[in-house]
Image (spheres, helix red, strand yellow):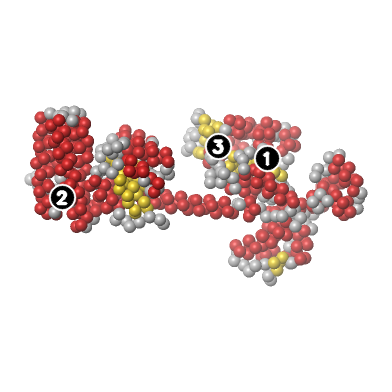
Amino acid sequence: MDAFRIFIVEDDLLYGEMLRHHLALNPDNEIYLYRNGEECLKNMYREPKMVSLDYSLPDMSGLDIMRRIKKDYPEIPVIIVSGQEDISTAVTLLREGAYDYFVKDDDVKDRLWNVIKKIRENLQLRSEISYLKEEIGRKYEFRNAIKGNSPAIKEIFSLIEKSIKTNISVSITGETGTGKELVAKAIHYNSKRAKKPFVAINVSAIPKELIESEMFGHEKGSFTGAITRKIGKFEQAQGGTIFLDEVAEMDLSMQTKLLRVVQERELNRVGGNDLIKIDVRLIVATNLNLTEEVKKGNFREDLYYRLLGLPIELPPLRYRGNDIILLAKHFVDEFCQENKMKKLSITESAQQKLMQYSFPGNVRELRAIIELAAVLTDSDKIDHSHISFNAVDTVENLLMEENTLTEYTRKIISFYLQKHNNNVLLVAKKLDIGKSTIYRMIKEKQIVI
Amino acid sequence: MSEKITLYHLDTLIGFVGDDPEAIKNMVRIFMQTTPELLETINECFKLRYSEKLYKAAHSIKPTLDVFGIDKLYATIRKIEQKSRDGELDSEMITLINELNTVLEDVFKALRDKYL
């Protein structure tokens, strides 16, 4: 750790020298002694870790100096040392941001040691937190976090890049396991809000009667069981991002309350009267079709438009072509590293088997399949025999939907087009149909590409 | 039987700077340099009836007297501080300032003899 630089601002030469001598007993401390406020302010560029300030200085009051220090260096703790105990002055100083207030008596040296110890511990913690935040930032640097080269995922990269430049709300849709929370985190940790909290709530996991208190907090005694004040997730996310997963599961009365918070940017804790200003970025996700939910009357239309912001639709893994292999290799490397295993490769036949599967559980399912395969193999290769799919027959699942033949045709053609990067000629050839059929369906907007 | 109050003691000072003869000598030197100036200010201000300036000087000298363990003046300097803040430069103040002068003269002599 660097030297712990301390400024002592003291016009009493004896007291100042004594403090300097005392604090210099710890060789980690680097002490600077100034006789007046002006000298101290002139030297603040040295960025001390702490300032011990005599309240009565010849050129200006301790309060004035402290205010000027706090204006430019709000993080630096200022301890006021005063010749006499004056409760009202002490209260004013503490309210204005003094770290502590001491009277010049026998205890002052012990108090200073304690306060220095506390400040050092805080600084250590702060530097650890900042290191961890940087680590998280690196982890969620979106090109590291989200793997893939397919046109579908490149489109997602481009949308993420757009979203991180502003504070626009983002709505992420996609089947289960496509990585909605990962995208939300990637947006947060690459945005200007990265140093502030990312708070996630899974709306469907919280009982209806608790969700308001969970999101907005509550005051002590506001309902049976509210034995202390609770700060809600929105307040926890102050300055950062809140991620509402499975937002379509929210009941209508809670939707009304959320709409108010989103519109007004302020909230009341349950049972509270004070309005609390909120500065959070909102990212929502759902695997349901929100437009459909609005049509069915399950989701408020006004809230839908408020939340929609920049829509990001995550492609199912089966539409991401070769990303399946890229991700499989990444997961196997990660698994081997985490478990201190030898590096494993994936054979051609195993790759082929993976490419022919529809992955209803998407990336999450692929990871589970690969991790199991890595455990099952006895060699340095994952072969097709180690790959096992747990999902029930997907063709049977498709037929269970009981669609019309036209709808099945539309789905099949859409699937092929997405898989083959909208190459109409190739898809027509593979399905053994005329290309004009496909063009007609596109023109009639039965198929959207 | 009442305990005899010593002229000064350096317990507090040693608590701050440790039992380091050089450091103690240095602090005594600073004390001998700054305290007579403050005492002079107190005397002058009393003569000129500058109660506010007197208060400031008394306020400044107070921690120094505590550090050098001049317990005889513990109550005296606080009384001078309080009375000057209240603008009471009366006959009691004369007694208090005289006591301050007398005791400090003895302390200066004792410290000079022992340390300088």
Mark 1 nearby-residue class (10 Å; few <14, some 14–19, many ≥20): some
| Residue bearing the label numbered 3 | A279
In the image, what residue type sits under mark 1? Leu
Name which residue lies at 34% across and 53% down.
A30
| Residue bearing the label numbered 2 | B9
Q: Chain of mark 3?
A: A
Q: Residue A9: give x, y in percent of width and height.
A: 31, 44
In the image, what residue type sits under mark 2? His
In the image, what residue type sits under mark 3? Asp
Rendered image quadrant of residue B102: top left
| Residue bearing the label numbered 1 | A310
Q: Chain of mark 2?
A: B
Label located before the other in sequence (1 or 3): 3
Mark 2 nearby-residue class (10 Å; few <14, some 14–19, many ≥20): some
Q: Do the numbered discs 2 and 1 sit on residues whose CB atoms are within 8 Å?
A: no
Whether residue A72 is visible, yes or no, is yes
Left or right, A94 with respect to A146, comes to: left
Q: Residue A233: give x, y in percent of width and height.
A: 55, 40
Name which residue lies at 35% across and 38% down.
A65
Q: Are marks 1 and 3 on the same chain?
A: yes
Residue B91 position (above or below residue A234): above
